[in-house]
Image: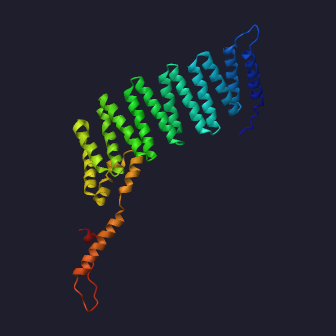
Amino acid sequence: MFNLNFSAKIREAEEHVKQGEKYMKTSFLKWKPDLDSAIDEFDKACTCYRVAEKYDQCRDLSIRVAELQIQKGTPFFAAKSYEQAAQMTQQLQDLPTAAKYYDRAGQLYVEGGYRDSGAILYERCALQFQQMDRAITIDFYLKSARLAEQEDKAYQAADLYEKAAMQAIRMSNFPKTSELLEEVTEILTKIERFDRINRVILYRVLLKLFNEDSVAGRNIFNQACQNYPTFDNWEERDHIGSLLDAFDLDDKDLISQRCQKPFFMAIEPEFVRLMKRWIRPTTDTQSSNNAAQQRTTNSTAPSTSSGTKPIQLDDDDDLR
């Protein structure tokens, strides 16, 4: 790696800032600052600071430019400047403040009538933050979804609500996940996109089972069978019904067996991880069966004074 000397870029940035300050000054003959010229100079300085990796100076100046754009009445460009400030703040590893600046940018897009741009920004930022702060990610997905709804983009909104739900389940926030998936179901029902409802119903049923409420899970299942022919005719529906039957019987071995179906192991990874709590190790079950078989054999075998041991069956015979 070359050891780059950014001093020239920093000096260039400082010159642009000085020139911008001159445009901001007023006098007896100049009553108003020249905002356009000042903004142009400050923007050039921001570029120089960014290239020179002076992220804090670039951030501070970007915020100043954003406020000047608001003063000028151009919220779209103010939003762009706040986006840049957020990016610089991320470089400085200050994620909560970066999220605040991104949020401000989104608000400015909406205020300027650019709801689509705001929705795109929030969705993009949600993706950026999902490995760092899931609470921020959920908030951004929800804001994007609401903007999509305002633009009558219901299908997009449903997709965003579902993405928020998948983040909530990763936080083990079952009530929030249930709430969001109910929202998804309602939207998809209104726009008659029944092709997407099946998997959502499955997740809602599983959430009730995770929460040890099999009755509520059964109710969701039965209502889905009645209200959505696509679900009632779904070839995988029987697997869900069989799992519910096992919970109704409170048969832990049966639950373990049925939740290991390939269908369940191919769903959203976080749901799979939670379902693995129900899986009972095969060795434990086998040991219990062997122990029971041994007790039965001992109790029925005749006693012998010669000390000859009773004949033991092979494992395969035990299973038969």
Q: Quadrant of residue 85?
A: top right
- In the displayed structure, 227 sits above or below 109; it is below
Q: Residue at x 31, y 52 (%)?
A: 261
- In the displayed structure, 83 sits above or below 240; it is above
Q: Tell me the quarter of the image containing the C terminus.
A: bottom left
Question: Farthest residue toward the bottom?
Answer: 305
Q: Is residue 233 visible?
A: no
Question: Farthest residue toward the top?
Answer: 29
Picture coordinates of residue 128, whole percent (x, y): 53, 37
Q: Residue at x 76, y 21 (%)?
A: 18
Q: Relative to the observer, which residue lies in front, 260 or 169? A: 169
Q: Residue at x 77, y 26 (%)?
A: 11
Q: Quadrant of residue 283?
A: bottom left
Q: Relative to the observer, which residue lies in front, 157 or 5? A: 157
Q: Tell me the quarter of the image containing the N terminus.
A: top right
Q: Residue at x 64, y 33 (%)?
A: 88
Picture coordinates of residue 262, whole percent (x, y): 33, 50
Q: Relative to the observer, which residue lies in front, 112 or 298? A: 112
Q: Is residue 157 visible?
A: yes
Picture coordinates of residue 93, whole percent (x, y): 63, 40
For residue 65, side relative to residue 278 (left or right): right
- In the displayed structure, 279 sits above or below 58; it is below
For residue 111, side relative to residue 243 (left or right): right
